[in-house]
Amino acid sequence: MKTVKRKTWSEKLENDKGLPKVQKITGRLNKRWGEGTMVIPAPREVDEIMRKVPESKLITINDIRMALAKKHKTKVCCPITTGMFVWIAAHASEERRQRGKKDITPYWRTLKTGGFLNEKYPGGAEEQKRLLEREGHKVVRKGQKYVVLEYEKSLVQV
């Protein structure tokens, strides 16, 4: 039986698979967003925005989507692929950190909508909480999840 070598997170991040791609909004998406175009971003574009967030500042996945839609002159940016690429960028960054690299993407500064932490990041929401608190953010539990208090005050403009 042939063993398949799994791609590293960094390899996944580097593989653009023909992206970015701009396409017409059709079908079910048309009901949600109306007429126009949508960009399906490249993983490295998402990582590039995340990488620029300075210490003590924050960004949300929706902010990344808005920046990419503006960059590609489209009405919207695909939420599913953007979310997946944020996840890949986070794991690729952690992979680099574990190999001793210092120049990594500060993925912990990227929040979900409403200032919520991302449990899919390396180490889960607990690790993201630790890293954010180290930078001076106040993180509290809201139900089963963690949220950054007054996160809007720390949002970076993209």
Image (cartoon, helix red, strand yellow):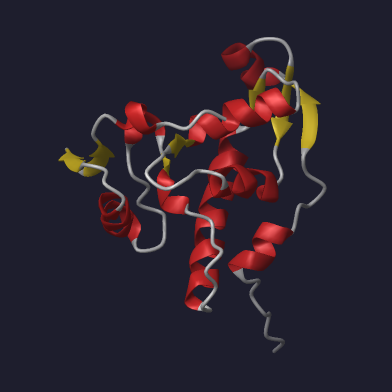
State which quarter of the image contains the N terminus: bottom right
Of residues 49 and 22, the one drawn nearer to the viewer in this rendering: 49
Residue 15 at x, y = what percent?
Answer: 74, 58
Measuring 63% from the left and 20% from the top, which residue is drawn there? 28
Residue 136 at x, y = what percent?
Answer: 26, 46
Side (left or right) of 139 relative to 52: left
Residue 29 at x, y = what percent?
Answer: 63, 20
State which quarter of the image contains the C terminus: top right
Side (left or right) of 34 relative to 108: right
Measuring 68% from the left and 66% from the top, which residue is drawn there? 11
Q: How many marks?
A: 0
Measuring 75% from the left and 27% from the top, which residue is drawn there? 72
Question: From this viewpoint, which residue is outermost toward the bottom?
Answer: 1
Asked which quadrant contains residue 30, the reply is: top right
**In the picture shown, does residue 144 fall above or below 63?**
below
**In the picture shown, does residue 8 fall above or below 113?**
below
Measuring 53% from the left and 79% from the top, which residue is drawn there? 99
Asked which quadrant contains residue 57, the reply is: top left
Residue 118 at x, y = what percent?
Answer: 37, 47
Asked which quadrant contains residue 23, the reply is: top right
**In the picture shown, does residue 60 fall above or below 95?**
above
